Image: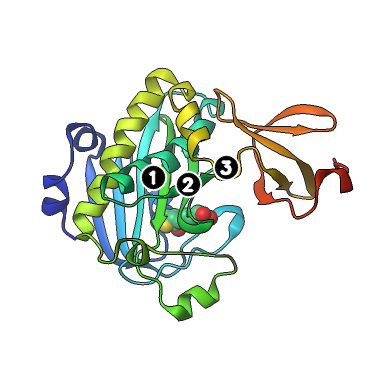
Amino acid sequence: MNEASLRSHLNLEAERAIDIVQVFDEIDSTNSEALRQIRSGDGANRLIVANSQSAGRGRRGREWLSPQNGVYFSLTRRFDLDADALQGLSLVTAISIVEALHGLGVSGLQVKWPNDVLHKKKKLAGILLELQPNAAAQYVVFGVGVNCELSAEAVSRIDRPVTDLKTLMGALPASDLLLATLLNRLCQNMGNYELNGFSPFENTWNNLDCYRMSDIVIQNGESRLIGKSLGVDATGALLLQSASGIQAISSGEVFPSLRPLSDETNKP
Ligand code: BTN
């Protein structure tokens, strides 16, 4: 991967959205590096890419196993929006990954709220969005990891069903083309989101959501909510139908419900 070959594949929106590109063979975490840069006062929209990460971070403090030859990147972008309005961005990022990979011939991808990309309920890609204000503005770090080629040993170290692009595509595309395709769609969708919010993406999400109209459990810290997923609303909140009515949920982790709803009561 080098900057010139990457830039040769970028569309105008992505080219404009990325001031600086930094490519590492290995780094602790591209998100951690992006946050360090912002905290040091750097205001550039920066793309940080690594071939592997020694301390890749996932959501909820989990590790993101990042062996060599995966796609691991963080894109920094300044936003003049409220932190609340940024919620839908993580869903838009997941949609962008699905659309980009679809353009490369990968079919059958789905999403899981708020931002997992799955194939047959096995995780292919994860997204970690982190907000960091600095003196000048509010910055969002878009961290994206796509499993490209996981060894059997790596799969055995991950505590949930996973898949990789090699399995789905047979042969992997060149890494600069793959990364540019992801960035092109992400930057295009981010521009749309900045202008129009989440509502243009609501139907797309609901058509891709693998748990919509299924019984689910939403875990948020100690709290567990049980109900049927009705998909998302125009802000990206998850609509959960339970005995007590329909609630719009803005954070938590979704699991399939293993028991019929009538056996459970919601615990606050
Ligand atoms: C998750 O599904 O838990 C989110 C995983 C996000 C992983 C990416 S890889 C690039 C960036 N750097 C990190 O340390 N994490 C994100």
Q: Is residue 4 left or right of residue 172?
A: left
Q: Earlier in the sequence, mark 3 or mark 1?
A: 1
Tell me the distance, in whole angstroms, between the alpha carbons under discs 3 and 1: 13 Å
Q: Quadrant of the C terminus?
A: top right
The image quarter containing residue 258 is: bottom right
Q: Of marks 2 and 1, which one's residue comes earlier in the chain?
A: 1
Badge 1 crowding class, 10 Å Cα cut-off, few under 14, some 14 to 19, many 20 or more, is many
Task: Residue 263 in the image: state x and y as whole percent.
Answer: 88, 48
Where's residue 25, x and y in %?
A: 27, 68
SS under mark 2: strand
Q: Secondary structure at mark 3?
A: loop
Q: Residue at x 43, y 49 (%)?
A: 109
Return the mark for residue 113.
Answer: 3
Query: Is residue 66 toward the left or the right of residue 82 in the image?
Result: left
Is residue 143 something that shows in the picture?
Answer: yes
Residue drawn at (30%, 56%), measured in percent from left and top? Answer: 49
- Give the residue number, with chain letter if any, for mark 1: 98
Q: Which quarter of the figure is the N terminus placed in?
A: bottom left
- What mark, if any, has residue 110 been given in the picture? 2
| Residue 44 can be seen, yes or no | no
Q: CA distance from mark 3 to mark 2?
A: 10 Å
Q: Is residue 1 found left or right of 164 in the rendered image?
A: left
| Contact? badges 2 and 1 (CB < 8 Å) | yes
Tag 2: amino acid: Gln
Return the x and y of residue 108 as percentages of the image width and height.
42, 50
Q: Amino acid at mark 3?
A: Trp
Mark 2 nearby-residue class (10 Å; few <14, some 14–19, many ≥20): many
User: Going by the image, does 145 lie left or right of 221?
Assistant: left
